[in-house]
Amino acid sequence: MSIPRRQFLKSAGIGIAAMAAGPAHAWESKAPDDPLGCLVDVTRCIGCRKCELACNQVNALPEPETPFEDMRVLDAKRRPTASAYTVVNRYYPGALNERGQLTPAFVKIQCMHCQDPACVSACVTGALSKKENGTVHYDASRCIGCRYCMVACPFEIPAYDFHEALTPQVRKCTFCLERLEEGKMPGCASICPTEAITFGRRSVLLGLARERIEGDPARYEDHVYGEHEAGGTSWLYIAGQPMAKLGFPAVPDEPLPRRSETIQHALFSYLWSPALLFGALALSMKTFAGKHADKE
């Protein structure tokens, strides 16, 4: 029995209305209560790249083409890659020294280990997960290489390793998970000669950040990057210049999975959306077949 176009559209409209009237699926945060994290004080960083060296050694990454002692790499902006989980960039945000010369600022970049990670929400196989200790963990055995995590990350962190043709992997900072489980600090935090990286519980780090800002307002901008961005991150930053001048992206305070998961739940309540989609496809095919038969 054929279904007239008008009747189908009417049914589709009823279906959409029913979907909208269905029970709401409230989004639930998966953020741990007080995870481990790191506070990076940009005003203390001297750009020595010791953190890059420690990261390379702890994760057994390939030796870089340019030695860690060669500071010429700071002449160009870099992003983390499959063979470098953290990098340091140099900026000239406008501050002058006593001689009137521009003073550089150095910024360490790595996975932010978000409280509610967009990459975890986007991962269709559960290869990425948020641990109670704060790490965003990657399980290569469950990865299918879809790279949705790379698209979802607001900080553009995950990289793809193409060197192993049969077993390509998504690569990023691991937060030195094995070291954390042994009660040790991440490699980068343990080696920093100026203590620009402080490791601890997120709540304690936020308190320390506020203490430094309030204790020396001339030195610091009144902004703890990562306190609210993307719903909060385990890596936090304070600096003497606006974050926008130091390469930090402007991301919303709302956790990104709140938007995507809410939309998904609304669309697929009671399977209305798939049913309407397949119904529309069936109608299109039937209409096309009818027109083709009339021409013959």
Image (cartoon, grey):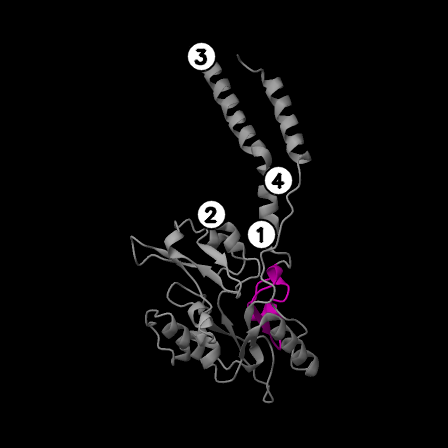
- Residue under numbered circle 4: 266
Give the residues drawn in magenta, as a range.
226-251
* Residue drawn 58% across the image and 75% down it: 93
* Residue drawn 48% across the image and 81% down it: 192
Q: Is residue 70 above or below residue 15?
A: below
Q: Earlier in the sequence, mark 2 or mark 4?
A: 2
- Residue under numbered circle 2: 124
Considering the numbered disc 1 on the image, is that residue within a helix, a strand or a loop?
helix
Residue 87 shows in the view? no
Q: Which of these two is toward me, 249 or 199?
A: 199
Q: Earlier in the sequence, mark 1 or mark 2?
A: 2
Q: Residues within 10 Å of mark 3 (few under 14, many from 20)?
A: few
Q: Amino acid at mark 2?
A: Val
Q: Is residue 23 above or below residue 239?
A: above
Q: Amino acid at mark 4?
A: Ala
Residue 147 image position (x, y, % from top left): 43, 51
Q: Which of these two is toward me, 257 or 87?
A: 257
